[in-house]
Amino acid sequence: MPPVASNGIGELYLSAAEIRTRVDELGAAIARDYEGREPLLVSTLKTSVFFLADLSRAISIPHALDFIALAGYDGRGGGSSGVRLLKDLDTSIEGRDVLLVEDVVDTGLTLNYVCKTLSLRAPASLNAVTFLDRPYRRLVDDLPVRYVGFTVPDEFFVGYGFDLDERYRHFPDLRLLKR
Amino acid sequence: MASEVPDFQAYCGRGEPRFANDVELECAKLLDYYRVPWQYEPTTFVLERAADGSVVEAFKPDFYLPEQDLYLELTVMKQSLVTRKNRKLRKLRELYPDIRIKLFYKRDIQRLAERYRLDLAS
C-alpha cells in the first residue's frame, strides 16, 4: 500500500454536522412516506453501515433492519464469475416494503443487480435511499432511488464508512481524498 | 488485440466479440459480471455521405446495453485524438437525437479501474 502523508487524508467535504442534518431530513421524509407500513431497511455491507445506523435512528416509525453482502467485482481475480450474494437476507421480504440503503450510487451496476434479485421475492415495494449520488458514470438509469443525501462530483471520498484499503471509515465526516 | 476472451453470460450480440484492446475486454467483463445484457459494436452510425452516397464518415460505438437503450464508447486516446472523437460524438447526437450514448474518457476508465480493480494491461 502506498504511504499516505499525514496531511494527505483528504480535505473536508461534508462535516459531521452537515451529514447529521441531511440524514435527519431523510429520516423524517422516510417516516412520513412509510407511516403505518413498517418498512424493512436493507443495507449492503460494509460502507453503508454508518449511514444505516444514523438513518435508522432518524426514522421515528417502527422499522426493521437486515443486511446483504455482495461479492464485488475484482478484475485482478479475472472477473470471470458472476456477482453473487455472500450474505443473503435473514428474513423474507414477500409482501414487505423494502428500502435499500446505499452508500453511493455510481455506475448503478450493483444497485441494479440487488433490485433485480430482490424484486423476484415479491416485496410490496422496493425503493432505495443513497447517501451519495454520483451520476457522472451512470450506466443504469432506471433505478428506484427515491431519496438522495448528497449529489457529489467525480471524486474519491473517505470517511463516514468510505475507505481506502479498509482505512479511514471511522471519520465522522466525509473527506475528499488527494490521490 | 485483447487477451483471451472469457465465457460471457450476459452477451446478447451476434458472433463472438473481438475486442480491440484490453480496456474493452475489461469493460465487457465488468458488465457481464453484473449480468447487464450487452452487445459489442452492433451499430454503425453514418455521419456523412459523399454526393454519390458513399460513406465519408461513420461512428461505431463500442457497446450497446439493450436494457438501458444506451451506447457506450470508451477511449484511452491522448487529448488531441479525443477532440476528434468528441466532434464525432457531437455530430452523432445532432444527426440521431434519440440515440443515448456515453463517452468514457481515459480518466473515467482509470476511475473504473480503481473502483473495480480492472486488469488494464494496455
Image (cartoon, coloured by chain):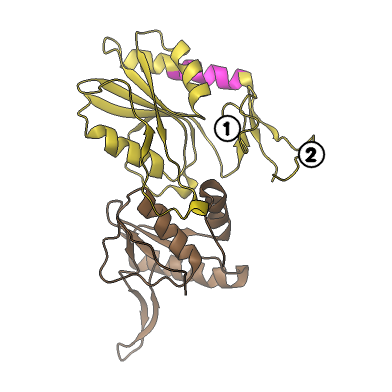
Chain colours: A yellow, B brown
Dot 1 amino acid type: Phe
Taking depth in this image into account, of B20 and A138 the one nearest to the observer is: B20
Q: Quadrant of residue A31?
A: top left
**Residue A67 spot, x, y in % from top left:** 39, 24
Dot 2 amino acid type: Ala
On the image, numbered disc 1 is attached to which residue?
A162
Range of magenta residues: A17-26
Instruction: Please tell me whether the stretch drawn in magenta is mainly helix, strand or loop.
Output: helix
Q: Earlier in the sequence, mark 1 or mark 2?
A: 2
- Disc on res. B14: none
**Residue A89 spot, x, y in % from top left:** 33, 25
Residue at horizontal 32 percent and vertical 49 percent from the top:
B35
Taking depth in this image into account, of B109 and B97 the one nearest to the observer is: B109
Q: Is residue A88 above or below residue A59?
A: below
On the image, numbered disc 2 is attached to which residue?
A5
Q: Residue furthest right?
A: A6
